[in-house]
Image (tube, rainbow, N blue to C red):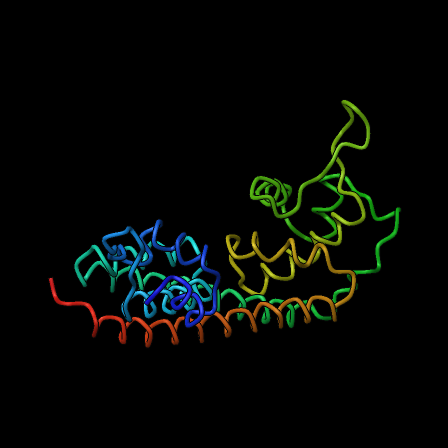
């Protein structure tokens, strides 16, 4: 096959086929006596497998896996695939945690903040019924960070910070760990209504499903490719 034939069957450009070969995603093409590239079914299957892997694990990891297909022992390839699935599994569990967290604090008035809600550390600790050291821990972890309202002045929790502190307090009481909350809080912090939170979490859920399906397709494509590659 010519370069254009591989590009047409793989659904990409001629230059992309050349780039994939250069990156080791495709095995080196044979050359005619006059220097023209000659491809076969292995190259088409490699390009198709890469496209599915890129959709499921991202282009960087897809290139890494495809290079392993052509140059590394089978156990190393399987380990890379297992790791890609494990990362998706972790993300799926994180989305589930976020959904449960959103349900836990669904009644929290996230849009109900007033200038008078600004507080010092001791005031906010008393309002929440926690120790000041707890707030300092949340500060160190980046969950709720007080700010200085004037140069050299004491740090205070502004209204949005107080709202974040109420949310973190609710989630911690519900048993949510600090590490997952670091990933969740930016989404909750940017949302002004709970329907925005719900929509964001639904989009993340759909993204995980789409990438999981892509990895399933990639596994089938890699199996078809393996049948064309002679054992080492």
Q: Residue 227: x, y in percent?
A: 20, 74
Q: Tell me residue 133's x, y (percent).
A: 60, 41
Image coordinates of residue 108 in percent, x first then y, are 74, 65
Q: Tell which of 146 and 7 is nearer to you.
A: 7
For this view, does 59 lie left or right of residue 26?
right
Residue drawn at (75%, 54%) of the image: 163
**Residue 145 drawn at (x, y percent):** 67, 41
Residue name at image x 35 percent, y 64 percent: 2
Taking depth in this image into account, of 1 and 205 the one nearest to the observer is 1
Question: Taking 45 as reference, is 169 above or below it?
Answer: above
Relative placement, left or right, of 19 versus 112 is left
Furthest residue in direction top, as rendered = 152
Residue 176 shown left or right of residue 125 in the figure = left
The structure residue drawn at horizontal position 60% and vertical position 67%, both measured from the top left corner, is 101
Q: Is residue 154 above or below residue 82?
A: above
Residue 119 appears left or right of 3 = right
Q: As displayed, is residue 5 above or below residue 119?
A: below
């Amino acid at each position: 096959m010519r370069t254009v034939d591989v590009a047409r069957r793989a659904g990409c450009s001629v230059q992309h086929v050349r780039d994939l070969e250069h990156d080791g995603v495709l095995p080196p093409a044979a050359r005619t006596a006059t220097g023209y590239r000659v491809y076969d079914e292995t190259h088409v299957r490699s390009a198709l497998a890469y496209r599915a892997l890129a959709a499921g694990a991202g282009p960087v990891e897809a290139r890494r896996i495809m290079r392993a297909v052509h140059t590394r022992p089978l156990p190393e390839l399987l380990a890379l695939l297992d790791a890609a699935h494990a990362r998706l599994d972790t993300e799926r569990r994180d989305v589930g945690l976020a959904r449960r967290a959103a349900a836990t604090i669904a009644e929290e008035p996230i849009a109900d903040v007033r200038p008078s809600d600004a507080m010092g550390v001791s005031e906010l600790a008393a309002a929440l019924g926690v120790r000041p050291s707890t707030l300092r821990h949340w500060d160190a972890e980046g969950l709720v960070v007080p700010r200085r309202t004037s140069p050299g002045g004491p740090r205070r929790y502004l209204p949005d910070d107080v709202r974040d502190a109420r949310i973190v307090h609710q989630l911690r009481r519900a048993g949510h760990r600090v590490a997952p909350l670091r990933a969740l809080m930016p989404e909750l912090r940017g949302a002004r209504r709970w329907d925005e939170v719900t929509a964001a979490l639904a989009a993340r859920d759909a993204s995980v499903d789409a990438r999981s399906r892509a990895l399933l397709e990639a596994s089938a494509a890699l199996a078809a490719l393996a049948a064309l590659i002679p054992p080492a």
